[in-house]
Image (cartoon, helix red, strand yellow):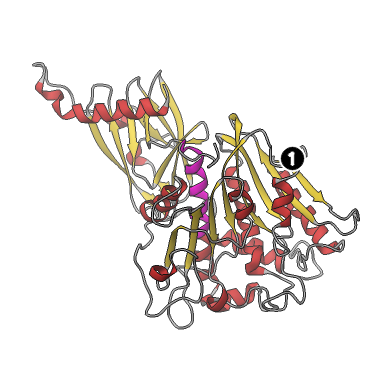
């Protein structure tokens, strides 16, 4: 039974359940969910769910069903269940439940095969989220720190693209090893346009995960190169903590979170090069024919981009204002209407699942923002909507018809350290008022993008605009 039919059946059952007592003379016994449902191999009322973590469940009895709220995700065979409902078709369903770090209560609606229902409240406590700010900080601190003991610091700095930069080559091998260690088919994609192998135009890390549908492809990425010395507007950087070691580390954490999931389409997780030189890395991947480049015979459905992460809500600037939070979907062909279905996913994740504030504004305006709607968004903290904004690797895939989401923190006047020697992890910590604040900000945006990907994968309406 497909998921649409399952959802329809559950809807009908919930509708007719209150009428069950109107027919027949025999009084039914009250339903007990614990007779059929277990979480982590105990009765639901005895389970303790940890926020941000996966928990196993079993549901027994043909025709029995459960439904969850939007911030409690159901997975069957490693795949997100879009309807948040599961019905037993044979004897037993085995699955997993995933809460967010922001889930405050877990309520599960159980329905028996005869239409009786019971609401089950499961205790929840603080957990270790599958992607979290503390691990992100430890990883970026390791990557950006330089010392003589390579077990304590990696020193993967000076990642300028081109001229046979040994620092960049060393870092690319390190990132490649991370993805390979998690089981991904991983390649270094080197493309040269001038015939000199010592001066590559691009050197990307591409990690592939096979989907169940061989006709489509989707992806997620961020650029791992940093602004070279003398580059505008700030003169270049050696650490590139914000732009874009932050997004690079987020991709490393996603790779681990996605390792045991099953996606609908073939999926690439990428670290791009040469973004600072004009999106050369992502263009090389998208527009060349090679064994691990973007397949030309499959529909490219969507792409999510992570660039300049962490200097955003809920972190605050020294003047007390929250940093702006930008997330733009596209393409936005008509600013008066919604053009793409991925916008609905973007808004659902932020405002329905993560409960972000919709209309939080500052007394004043931010220094930079979107292209199409800045007049009404200039003082809005959560700048989340469709827009044409470019300036990063999502443009490569948007130009090919993919629906895209671009996550971006503060920039220009709101955080001018990027592309400068001041773009360091220490400076990020100082600007947001401490390590814990930076971790909180990164954790929020990482969860937003991760949930967008998981949900978009199971949203059939998200198709290539040229399909």
Q: Give the residue at mark 1.
A: 292
Residue at 71%, 68% (x, y): give it.
Answer: 144
Q: Is residue 141 left or right of residue 173?
A: left
Residue at 54%, 78% (x, y): give it.
Answer: 413
Pick the residue in front: 144 or 59.
144
Pick the residue in front: 398 or 125.
398
Snapshot quadrant of residue 298: top right
Pick the residue in front: 450 or 99.
450
How many marks the image carries: the answer is 1
Q: Main secondary structure of the magenta part?
A: helix
Bin the neighbour count of mark 1 within 10 Å (Cα to Cα): few under 14, some 14-19, many 20 and up: some
Q: Is residue 133 above or below residue 211?
A: below
> Can residue 421 be seen in the rendering of this structure?
yes
Residue 215 spot, x, y in % from top left: 60, 30
Q: Which portion, as a residue range, is magenta?
A: 444-460
Pick the residue in front: 403 or 122.
403
Residue 454 spot, x, y in % from top left: 50, 43
Q: Is residue 54 left or right of residue 298?
A: left
Q: Is residue 191 left or right of residue 377?
A: right
> Can residue 128 be seen in the rendering of this structure?
no
Residue at 11%, 19% (x, y): give it.
Answer: 23
Residue 172 spot, x, y in % from top left: 77, 55
Judge whether residue 451 is colored magenta. Answer: yes
């Amino acid at each position: 039974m497909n998921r649409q039919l399952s959802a329809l059946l559950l809807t009908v059952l919930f509708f007719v359940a209150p009428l069950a007592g109107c027919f027949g003379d025999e009084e039914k016994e009250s339903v007990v969910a614990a007779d059929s449902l277990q979480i982590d191999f105990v009765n639901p009322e005895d389970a303790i769910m940890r926020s941000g973590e996966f928990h196993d469940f079993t549901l027994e009895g043909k025709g029995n069903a459960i439904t969850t709220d939007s911030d409690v995700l159901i997975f069957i065979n490693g795949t997100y269940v879009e309807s948040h409902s599961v019905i037993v078709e044979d004897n037993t369903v085995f699955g997993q439940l995933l809460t967010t770090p922001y889930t405050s209560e877990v309520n599960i609606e159980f329905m028996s095969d005869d239409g009786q229902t019971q609401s089950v409240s499961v205790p929840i406590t603080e957990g270790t989220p599958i992607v979290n700010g503390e691990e992100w900080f430890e990883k970026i601190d390791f990557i950006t720190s330089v010392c003589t003991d390579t077990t304590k610091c990696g020193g993967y700095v000076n990642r300028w693209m081109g001229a046979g930069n040994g620092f960049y080559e060393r870092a690319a091998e390190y990132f490649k090893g991370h993805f390979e260690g998690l089981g991904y088919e991983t390649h270094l994609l080197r493309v040269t346009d001038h015939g000199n192998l010592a001066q590559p135009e691009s050197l990307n890390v591409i990690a592939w995960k096979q989907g169940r549908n061989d006709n489509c492809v989707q992806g997620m990425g961020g650029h791992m190169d940093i602004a070279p010395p003398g580059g505008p507007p700030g003169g270049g950087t050696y650490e590139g903590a914000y732009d874009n070691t932050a997004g690079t580390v987020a991709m490393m954490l996603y790779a681990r979170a996605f390792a045991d999931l099953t996606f609908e389409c073939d999926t690439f997780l990428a670290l791009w090069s040469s973004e600072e030189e004009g999106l050369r890395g992502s263009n090389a991947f998208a527009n060349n024919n090679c064994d691990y480049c973007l397949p030309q015979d499959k529909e490219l459905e969507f792409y999510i981009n992570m660039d300049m992460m962490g200097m955003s809500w809920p972190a605050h600037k020294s003047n007390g204002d929250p940093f702006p939070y930008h997330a733009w979907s596209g393409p936005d062909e008509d600013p008066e209407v919604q053009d793409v279905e991925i916008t609905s996913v973007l808004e659902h994740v932020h405002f329905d699942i993560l409960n972000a504030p919709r209309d939080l504004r500052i007394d004043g305006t931010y220094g930079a923002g979107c292209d199409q709607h800045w007049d009404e968004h200039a003082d809005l903290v959560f700048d989340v909507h469709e827009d044409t904004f470019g300036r990063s690797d999502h443009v490569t895939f948007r130009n090919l018809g993919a629906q895209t989401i671009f996550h971006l923190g503060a920039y220009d006047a709101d955080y001018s350290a990027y592309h400068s020697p001041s773009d360091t992890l220490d400076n990020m910590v100082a600007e947001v008022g401490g390590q814990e604040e930076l971790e909180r900000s990164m954790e929020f945006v990482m969860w937003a993008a991760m949930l967008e990907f998981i949900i978009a994968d199971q949203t059939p309406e998200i198709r290539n605009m040229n399909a």
